[in-house]
Amino acid sequence: MAEPTPTPENVSVTIDGMTLSVPKGTRLLDACAQAGVSISHYCYHPGLSAPAQCRMCLVEVEKSPKLVASCVGTVADGMVVHTQSENALKAREGVLEFYLVNHPLDCPVCDQAGECKLQDYVSAEGPPMGRSKEPKRVLGRDDFGGDVMFYADRCVMCTRCVRFMREVAQDERLTTVQRGSRTVIDTFYDEGLTGNIWADNIVDLCPVGALVSKDFLHKARAWDLDRTPSVCPNCSMGCNVRLETRDNQVMRLKPRPNPEVNAHWMCDFGRLNYSWMNRVDRIEAPLVRDGGRHVPMSWADTLTRLADALRGAAGGARAVVSPFEGNEGIGALRRVLEAVGGGDGVFRCEQGEEVILPGFPELALRRDRAANVVGAELFGFARTGGADGKGGLEQAAAHTGVLFVLGDELADAPADFGANASLFVYVGQHLAPAARNAHFVLPATTFAEMEGTFTNIQRRVQRFWPAQRAPGMARPSWQILGVLLAGISEAGAPGTAADAFAGLGAVRAEFGQLSWAELGAQGAVLPGVRELQETGD
Amino acid sequence: MAYPYRHPSEVQLLSKHFGEPEARTLQGWVERGGYQALRKALGMSPADIVTEVKNSGLRGRGGAGFPTGMKWSFMPKKEPGKPHFLVCNADESEPGTFKDRELMRWTPHALIEGCLIGAHAIHAEHAYIYIRGEFFEAAQIMARAIEEAYAAGYIGRNIFGSGIDLDLTLHIGAGAYICGEETGLLNSLEGRRGEPRVKPPFPAIAGAFRYPTAVNNVESLIAAAQVVLNGAEWYKQYGTEKSVGTKLFCVSGHVKRPGNYEMPLGFNFKEFIYDVCGGTPTGKPVKAVIPGGSSVPILKADELDIGMDYESMAAAGTMLGCGSVIVMDEGVNVVKQVRRMVDFYAHESCGQCTPCREGTAWSSKILRRIEMGRGAPEDLDTLLQISDNMSGKTICVLSDAAAAPIVSSIQKFRDDYLALMQAGQLAGAGVR
């Protein structure tokens, strides 16, 4: 280890024998983390104030008469900290024993089991056996409104939920009532949390199974879930999330911290709007129209036929894309349109009221309720239709040349949509009635089944990863359109999402200035932010 | 109406006018030399007042015994636009304590004077008296006295033509022991839940409404007013070298003459109990004495030959606290008394810190089980370990307070516990 170099802003602190240099004023708990020592804590959370009340994070500091709560204690130069001393271990074991005095130990039926900090800490540092022989306090459970159910007996009284509603949501709906071991979290009003779209964050914050999601209740065990980093597709904010799946079904969305986008939070609208990812009525094979019916065909034959058809197509091209598609698919479509002589493209997006999170105003449920509106605009697609995400397709419906539809289900389109098109290509997930006239129906994956990127309202390009297996022969749209492009132009076919992303620079130069690697897990902002933000509205 | 009991060994500086209803009125108080201290203080610079009180050696009478002048000197330099506050802690709620109540009942103007002098000393323009919610009568008397003093111009703008403005507000609590803890009190004063705050920052830096604040006990402020009037040297003639002055002792339990006694600090404790208070009314020997409020360690009968001052009490392993003496004779079941105290702390724990929230309630349940005859000797080890886990591990000292009687009673009256266990075993075996 390199010798720490003290600077005026840095202080030297020794933690469990390791000396390190950290900025003055660093929280002891964070300094310990830098030294590789993780300190148990309940009430402290980086997104909230620190009340230092759980007393779980006590550490021994030399020359301090009492143990120090490392969540509020800060480093001082020359400080010597012992996190594993007899006193510190005994204190933390003691606190854990106190938690177990009234805890119901109903892990077998508790939703939090497997991701519970009480289980974790007791396993790590708790007493080998509880000594309490006394009857436990029983408080029962309460529907807190919204998506939140409260199991009072499991509560460790860390008050993260109360502080989230007070400090971050700034909509004081929860409080502590009573005193001593009768203290319990409660709502102020009859409606409880109903109506506050940020309320489900308290379920994430709850370190134990006291606050649970009604939507997720008893649906899956934590250890059966697969967790995939992703981006919430439900508005143009692009909150960083994890898609949590079991048996290929999305079970829930959880926020993934990103200080530039969503901090630790996400809204209930985005969180609970995932059932469409589990739809079973999917197109599973490429379909080619033969007379009045669609016939399944192999990808190779389908794309060869489509390329041939495109080469002979006349009448100019038009396209409709869905803002739920990734940058790579939309960009590939733009390149295909250019290869056949260019053409207008539109997208539609449902809109709603913008709801800002007061305690972190960078985050809001944005007006556009789809992830990639900015991406669609950057690739030259114009907004059409109403705030309900419908209408505006008259020109496309009556188009007599080449017509592409990518992702948009055309749920509101009439049955004769595209009937006059010389070549109608439908790349999508579901076989909507309006697709009946398509000459080619190509099964595409949803964002949850592939790798790719969205561009959010801050013009931050963020990656998502495949969380579900694609049904049948469905393929990512960037792959379908990329192979097609290779068939009708000099471009090479992309083998990976990274290849597809690299091809975007050919359509929008600013994408060429970002590398796949620098996107990382938290994304990167496209150059030229200001100019582009103006066009974004 | 004469005050119930007086004793020639008393030195009545603060309690002199107890039992004189006229002293409650502004006129009566002025006739007794009242408001001279305030008049003198307003002519002094704040720094001089602080120095005088510091020199007197007066220590806070709320229980901790922290030097009053020193506390005032911790206040930061006054900055324009940043108010200072003086808050008088009149939430006297330690079981067995009733000295501040008597001070306010009989000499409300003395407290007004003390608050205004203290406020002036720390550059505060507004003082608050946070009075315990259950003190209905004392609150009424204080409210009337404050009204009278405002009307006479003793509180308010340009007091005595000094150019100094001081306001005083009486705030009535809602009845919680924890609001006697100074930061819990400040939260309650601000309209928040009465929960102690994490320190630092201390109230001198961020107190009431997050502004610099001094929190002083009723008795401390009244004593400080007398120090200002008569000088530090005058005050030093009472008490011992390190425990200067007089102190009100509230005596309850098994004594012939319970009540408040103002004794010079250092007075012999045994003499106090047997002579001043008259010993036990039943004639049974004294078994145990709690010398400073229910949260201090218990003394046995053979440990009483000590001085009633901060140092001697500490040397005997206990604390002078707020001077609340609870005497128990041989007829008392110590386990039951301790259980009742711990019940109190379990009820009054604010519920923030885990060791206190869970530890007080758990201890109370174990003690009750022992009391019912269903205990076992290993329960005592558990109790001691719980107490250890509760002590020094929390934001405030309520859980330390709850642990003290448990630990000292097990150490000193283990036989009482074992007797209950044995009786329970015999009863269980059908032996009566």
Image (cartoon, coloured by chain):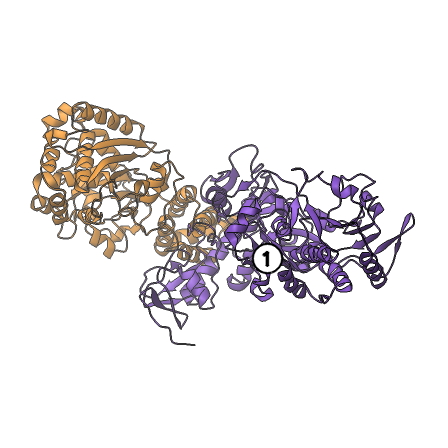
Chain colours: A purple, B orange
- Give the secondary structure at mark 1: strand
Quarter of the figure that contains the N terminus of chain B: top left
Foreground pick, B337 / A499: A499
Residue A292 at x, y = what percent?
A: 91, 47
Question: Residue at point 74% right, 41% down?
Answer: A395
Q: How many marks?
A: 1
**Where residue B203 sits in the image (x, y, percent)?**
29, 46
Left or right? Give the position of B229 relative to B67. left
B87 lies above or below A363? above
The vertical placement of B364 against A525, above or below, is above
Classify residue B125 as left or right of residue A536: left
Q: B134 or B428: nearer the eye? A: B134
Chain containing mark 1: A
The residue at the far right in this view is A291
Q: Residue at coordinates 56% horizontally, 50% vertically from top-left?
A: A204
Q: Residues within 10 Å of mark 1 (few under 14, many from 20)?
A: many
User: Which x, y percent locates residue A383?
Assistant: 65, 44
Quarter-of-image position of residue A476? bottom right
Q: Is residue B22 visible?
A: yes
Please provide percent x and percent y for residue B188: 36, 38
Mark 1 = which residue? A462
What amino acid type should be assigned to the residue bearing mark 1?
Gln
Location of residue B4 with respect to A209 vertically, above or below: above
Which quadrant of the structure image shows residue B141? top left
| Left or right, residue A109 beside residue B421 | right
Q: Is residue B84 above or below residue B411?
A: above
Q: Say which residue appears at 70% left-offset and 59% top-offset.
A: A450
Is B403 or A186 nearer to us in this picture?
A186
